[in-house]
Image (cartoon, grey):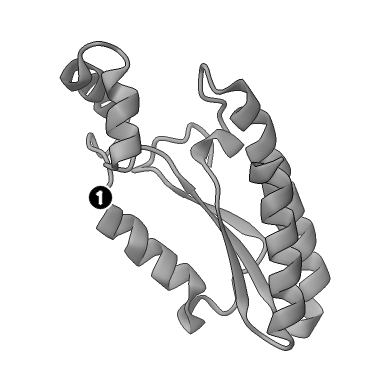
Amino acid sequence: DTVFLGAVRLARAAAEALGEGGVIGFVLSGSVHEPIPGLTISNGLRPGLAGFAKSLANDLGPRGVRVVGLLPSRIDTDRVRSLDALSGDADAARAASEATIPLRRYGTPEEFGRTAAFLLSPAASYLTGLMLPVDGGARSGF
């Protein structure tokens, strides 16, 4: 309820407050495109939010309001490190994950932040309704 409906309610309230122009940004997950084993509920909710965001982008576009999403995958955060530690050998889990990423490393919070800053900035003024993977190329599709 909190993950899905909370985000929907907040986005709708933001849309009303923005008036003409502005940007609503969602931080979802790489699981929007590729389910993550063991995260069944999240794997269902995140794609639903991505669909909501796209619909909202279509609805708000005529007012000049953009709606965008970021799909982080392996960003070197406390949360990701705790997930790696669940395996019993965090270093081995990280090495195995990094081996599946074309850039062969986890992203940094700073890299994620710079990507978000761009997507929310006027430099991205012609982008709306998109979900941008921030995953070092890990997504299988394009």
Image-quadrant location for residue 93: top left
Give the residue displayed 63% in from the left and 40% down from the top: 46
Vertical side of 32 occupied by 16: above or below: below
| For residue 36, side relative to residue 15 (left or right) | left
Image-quadrant location for residue 118: bottom left
Give the residue displayed 69% in from the left and 78% down from the top: 65
- Residue 22 spot, x, y in % from top left: 62, 81
Query: Residue lying farthest bottom?
Result: 20
Most foreground residue, 88 or 128: 88
How many marks overall? 1
Amino acid on which disc 1 is placed = Thr
Vertical side of 74 occupied by 117: above or below: below
Give the residue displayed 39% in from the left and 62% down from the top: 115
Q: Residues within 10 Å of mark 1 (few under 14, many from 20)?
A: few
Badge 1 marks a residue whose secondary structure is loop
| Residue annotated with mark 1 | 108
